[in-house]
Structure formats: structure tokens, C-alpha cells
Image (cartoon, grey):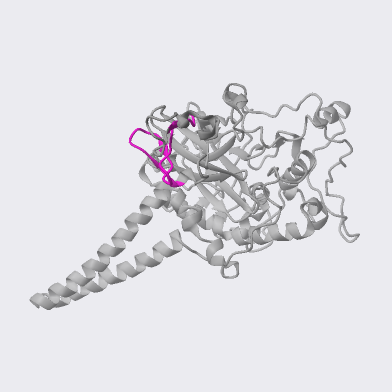
Amino acid sequence: MEVAVKSSLTSIHAPISVREARFTKPKLLSFQFHPRPNSSISRMLKKTPSKSKPFATMSSPVPSSVSTESMEQPEAELEAVSQEEKFDWYAQWYPVMPVCDLDKRVPHAKTVMGLDLVVWWDRNESEWKVFDDSCPHRLAPLSEGRIDQWGRLQCVYHGWCFNGSGNCKFIPQAPPDGPPVHTSMKACVAVYPSTVHHGIVWFWPNTDPQYRDIITKKQPPFIPELDDPSFTKTMGNRDFPYGYDVLIENVLDPAHLPYAHYGLVNALKPQVKSDREGGGPIDLSVKKLDSQGFLENQDHFGDTKFIAPCISYASSSPGDAPEKGSMQKRMAYVFICIPVSPGRSRLIWIFPRNFGLWIDKVVPRWIFHLKYNLVFDSDLYLLHMQERKFMDVGPENWQKACFVPTKSDALLVGYRRWFNKYSGGQVDWKGKYCGALPPTSPREQLFDRYRSHVVNCRSCNAAYKGLNALEVILQVASLAFIGVAAATKQNANTMVVMAVVCFAGSRWLARFIFKNFHYHDYNHAFR
């Protein structure tokens, strides 16, 4: 989906399209990758400045019947990665949730990197806090608790209360004239360093006190468009029944757009249309890669960056060059892919743009999310089953199992190269999981939008409740019209017609709610 999902500025249904856009390479952005002096990339560039080529794909041996003249194969990994270059999964900032989808009145349960978190608003310090979701008393989840009248996080199992620093402030069962057991270090909750950055709550996955001020030494990745007030920053989130690595691959793969999302996402048209969907060659190549990610350089969509471990970013400049004195239209595509647990991931998407800002003020987010969720559904089952096939052959055998001979796969190959080289081909769960994937659920559960999105999106949740209330109102109105017609016998025909219209409207609305907020199966054969 990378670099291909954008909101139409002419339709309230927000069709996702890049057909009309012509993309140009943007100017140098403020967050470029700077390889470490001792990194393998830096050494390679110093050793062979004129001969080194960007790699495009990586594949298993090519049959003799296939021409390899146009294929670019990556150079073999000859160097061992030093310990300093290995990617440390627990020395990074991770996004938890967009602030716009968090309710300050209640604590929220979230899982990131296999860590169970509770996110809550500390009104005494006016900050979002991220705690370990476990009460020190009997390990009950604090996310099931409440925020009491003094702004403290209260465990509802036995009423223990905690302030924003994780200190226990009240134990109801402790005698007031007895020893102050609530001051014991054992009564404290583990607190993760957290911050709000680009409208998203981020946390540092280590509760050791030495990281309390980590924000002063290392900050979350900076994206210029999300810090620019001239850009709109509407965002959304969704949980998926497949792993983080599969999600990253998918958003770095523009070649699947005309096929997996046929009729939903209009990819760029090739010069020669060879099939109904209109797919074609895409010339991609990874320019440089190190432990912090990689940079891709090509002219179709502008520069694309993978900022390890979560962010896929691309920018574009749609339309013709601006007239003198006018503003150049620019937009970006930001996909933040969050590792939740094996076989589970979360996506935060943001499509900032500096034009058509009025649309986001007029059209509620949930209208856009109807289309976005349909796009996500269209390849959800493919990715869920694909991950299981990867697991069957072994993640370390990805290169041997997958045949990727064209340049259109360069970005996902680049990601696999980074993942294997710097992280050993796996997320570091610190031994919490055995490595097995959750069992495959029925399609109704895999495609369930309510649990994966609606309950976590304030806009969609509000729309869901409002539409359900409207459905009930229409049903009541239908009965009322029938009652009036039977009682007065005046204008009976009109009353009956109104009753039928209200009943039909309630049935249509019930179907609309079910398909858009609960379950919408996707059959590619009938697209």
C-alpha cells in the first residue's frame, strides 16, 4: 500500500487514488540516514564508490529459461555484523496510539512488543502516562480500572491507587494508624518513559530508572510534514491478524496495488496495459541500508524511507509545477507498523497534505475510514495465510522460498535484508513467546472490524453508536406510524407508506452497520 493511498479531494466517500497524481522527487528532508562510520554500508561506499550498485531484488536460483540480463541481484553479504551494529529492539521509541483515539476519562489496554501496557491521562500533571498493566498487589490489569476523583489510577480489584509517577498513594485495606505500607517500593507500578510526538503517544520499552530522562538523549523519529501546521494530519489505526514483518513488507510493496486492491486503489498506469488490472514493471532500488533502516530512490513516487523499526515514509508532489507565487501541493504517506505479538500487529496511518485542508474539517474521519478499512480487508486474508507459509518454511529461508526476480520487489527485499542482517530475521520478544503463531480463526473473526478498529477509533465508535440509535428510532417510528394509522384511520395510506419507508430504512441501515463496522467478507473472484 506504500505511496498509493490518498484521499480524493472531490468525493465525500474519499476514494483512494493516485491515478491523477504525477510524483516528483522532493527536496532533501530533515531526517536522512547517516550510516555509522564503521557500518558495512559506509565501508562498501568507501571501497567501491564508482562500482557499487543499489540492490534491487533477491531470489532463489533462476531457471535457465528465464533471462537474467535485466535482473539486478544484490551483492552477497560477506561481512559479519558487529555487535554495535546489531539492532536493539529495546533501545527504540515505539508508538502506542494516536492521541485523537484516546479517551482521557478511562485507562486503555494496549500491547506493544509483547508488553502489556495501560495508557491513561494524568490530569494532575496534564500528561499521558504509560504503565505496566499489572497491579503490584495481585497482578490484576490496571486497564480494567478507573481514574478516581483525585485523578489517580485506581485498580478496581481492591482499590489501590497510583499517581503519575507510579507511586501507590492509597491502600484501603491498610489501617490508617498502622505502618505506611503504601510507601513501600513493592507497592509501586512500573512506569515506562513516554511522550506525545506528532499527535501520537510513544513509549520507551524499559522501566529501569536510568531511562527516565531518555527523551533528552534520544527522541522518536521526526517527520517534517507532521510538524508543519500547513499540513493536515488526519490519522487512523487498526489491528491485524498477522505479524509486524508481514505488515512492513506489504506497505513497501507497490506492485500488489492493482491486484489485491483492484477497484479500490488506482495505481499508476503502465505505458502498455497487458491485463485488466493494469499492473506493470516498477523500477525500484534501495540506495543505502544500515542498522537504522534504508533509503529508496526512484522517480515514480518520490523518495521512500524505512526508519527502523516501525516507519515507512514517502512523499510526493501531485500535479503540475506550481505557478509563480503559488504553493506547491505536497503530500506524504506515513505508515507506522507496530509489533504487538507473534502473528499480531497494529498500523497507524497518516496521510498529511498541504492542500484541501477544509475537507478534514467538514468530513468526519469515519467516512474516510470506511474506504480505508475496505482496502485493508482486501489483502488481509492473503497476508494472514502468507505468514503461515513463511513460518512453515522457516523465516530464515525466506530468500529460498520466495522467487523475486523483478525490481518491483526491491523494497520488501531491502526490508528482509535489514531484518535478517541486523535482527537475525526475528523480533526480539525476550523469550516471552515460543515462536508459534496463533491458530487461524474463522473469516468472521479475522475480518472483524469492530474489535480491530471501531472500538479503538473515537470517530468510528461515535458513528457506530449514533447509527445504531438511528436504526432504533426508525423502527420505533415505523411502529408509531402503524399505530396512528390504526387508531385514527385518517390518512391511513400515508401512514402505512411512512411506516414501510421507516422499516425499510432501518433494515438498510442495519445492513450498512454490519458491513462497515462488523464484518465485510472480500471475494477477489467477483471484483
- Which residue does the image show at 46% across and 55% down from the upper left? 370
Relative to residue 413, is residue 177 depicted above or below?
above
Find residue 383 and report its image quarter: bottom right
Q: What range is drawn magenta here?
A: 144-169
Residue 155 placement, left or right of 282: left
Residue 327 placement, left or right of 493: right
Q: Chief secondary structure of the magenta span?
A: loop
- Which residue does the image show at 84% across and 28% down from the upper left? 43
Looking at this rendering, what residue extends furthest in the top direction?
216
Residue 449 within the segment the image draws in magenta: no
Residue 158 within the segment the image draws in magenta: yes
Residue 33: percent from the left, percent from the top? 70, 29
Residue 324: percent from the left, percent from the top? 50, 27
Nearest the camera: 88 or 465?
88
- Which residue does the image show at 76% across and 60% down from the upper left? 392
Residue 285 placement, left or right of 443: right
- Which residue does the image show at 19% across and 75% down from the upper left? 496
Nearest the camera: 476 or 176?
176
Residue 402: percent from the left, percent from the top? 78, 56
Find residue 339 and report its image quarter: top right
Residue 455: percent from the left, percent from the top? 44, 52
Find residue 55 and report its image quarter: top right
Relative to residue 291, is residue 461 depicted above or below?
below
